[in-house]
Amino acid sequence: MIKVKKTIVLLPGDGIGPEVVAAAAAVLRDCATELGHEFSLEEHAVGGTAIDGNGNPLPEETLRACREADAVLLGAVGGPRWDALPLDGRPESGLLRLRKELNLYINLRPIRLREALRGLSPLAPGRRRNIDLEIVRELAGGIYFGEHRTERRNGHEKAFDVETYSTPEVERVARFAFGRSVARRKGLTSVDKANVLATSVLWRKTVEQVAGDFPDVALGHMYVDNAAMQLVLAPEQFDVLLTSNMFGDILSDAAAGLVGSIGLIPSMSCGDPSTGGAASGQEGTPLFEPIHGSAPQLAGKDCACPIGAMLSATMLLREAFGLGTEADWIEAALDRALVEGYRTADLAEAGSTVVGCSEFTERVREEMRRSVRQFEPYGWGV
Ligand code: IPM
Ligand code: MN
């Protein structure tokens, strides 16, 4: 097996961020020690914690470390403590700036119903036979990065949020989505609101043009309102969903609900990975993070679900470092812990053993150790 030497920046952030990042870091460390890789894990401040520390949600020193790293693993940012701040000074603005500075215009969110958790889907059994889709969300443009302004006129306030998209911005993320789809079931649904929005008319036209280079992919277009309903009624129809920044934010939380808990979903944000990756260092450092928020009400209680963060770590291994076997090993261990019935509170079912974040993590690590020993004598293969 190849051995790699990599630097990973950890950005625990706020709320439950530090607890779930600690869990993900533990499995990354195990991966290194068991299999002879060298991972140097460096922790830096982001979000509200960084505001408290030095008044900036994305300190220069953090940004520099991220630029120099091979990959970044982030927990979550935000919380009621900072909600009164102006938008451009909030914890969330640190994350948005980080995405922009690293040119992370692609965000990939895999949504899969795990076998052990089938019973947690709110869908009737007939409707959830095989939920396995990927959301490709544009991450560096759209309404998130347009002008946000509030003005006072004639005694009342008026607010603006501007959505813009250019052809190249749509094209580059669309290419990535087509590429994912080619490697999967060759379906692509592009989501827009082309019956109302100019940005969506451009979006649809551009996606149609890119489609010419991917004749094997069955492309469909869907208005976002219909897409929300179709996700709930018949999620099996979707292979890859391509969305703008804001539509992707909304649909990915809805899709997470379908597979049991938002605590389960990882994500990768990157620039152009087709040139060798995210791992090649040619584009911005790829960033991996669970899609859940900082869940302030759960923070400090050791009850958060670390699975989204752990799966972000396995996505990091697979997509950024090319360590697919290692990622499979960790995920298989995680699934065995679930099959044995160990669950954080959000995943509890009748008969399961509810454990905290750190105990669940220990169970996964134990399964990892057990399977390493079991497989080693037979040669590696999970
Ligand atoms: C997400 C989050 C972020 C977003 C927030 C924290 C800025 O909700 O990654 O989905 O809206 O992109
Ligand atoms: Mn979100």
Image (cartoon, helix red, strand yellow):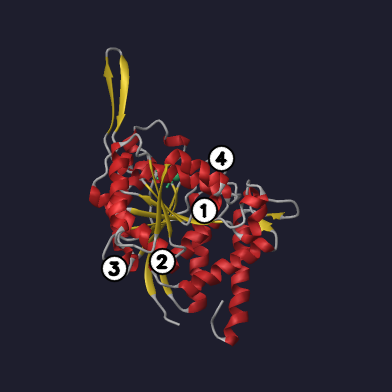
Sooner in the amino-acid sequence: mark 2 or mark 1:
1
x and y percent of residue 123 in the render? 63, 47
Which quadrant would the N terminus be assigned to in this image? Answer: bottom left
Above or below 115: residue 206: above
Q: Secondary structure at mark 2?
A: helix
Which residue position holds label 1? Answer: 237
> Which is more foreground, mark 1 or mark 3?
1
Q: Nearer the viewer, residue 265 or 74?
A: 265
Q: How many marks?
A: 4
> Which is more foreground, mark 2 or mark 3?
3
Label 2 with label 1: CB-CB less than 8 Å: no
Above or below 339: residue 346: above
How far apart marks 1 and 3 lie (CA) works out to 30 Å
Which residue position holds label 2? Answer: 319
How far apart marks 4 and 1 lie (CA) works out to 35 Å
Sooner in the amino-acid sequence: mark 4 or mark 3:
3
> Which is more foreground, mark 2 or mark 1?
1
- Given the image, on which type of amino acid does mark 4 rest? Gln
In the image as oriented, which residue stretches furthest toward the top?
A: 154
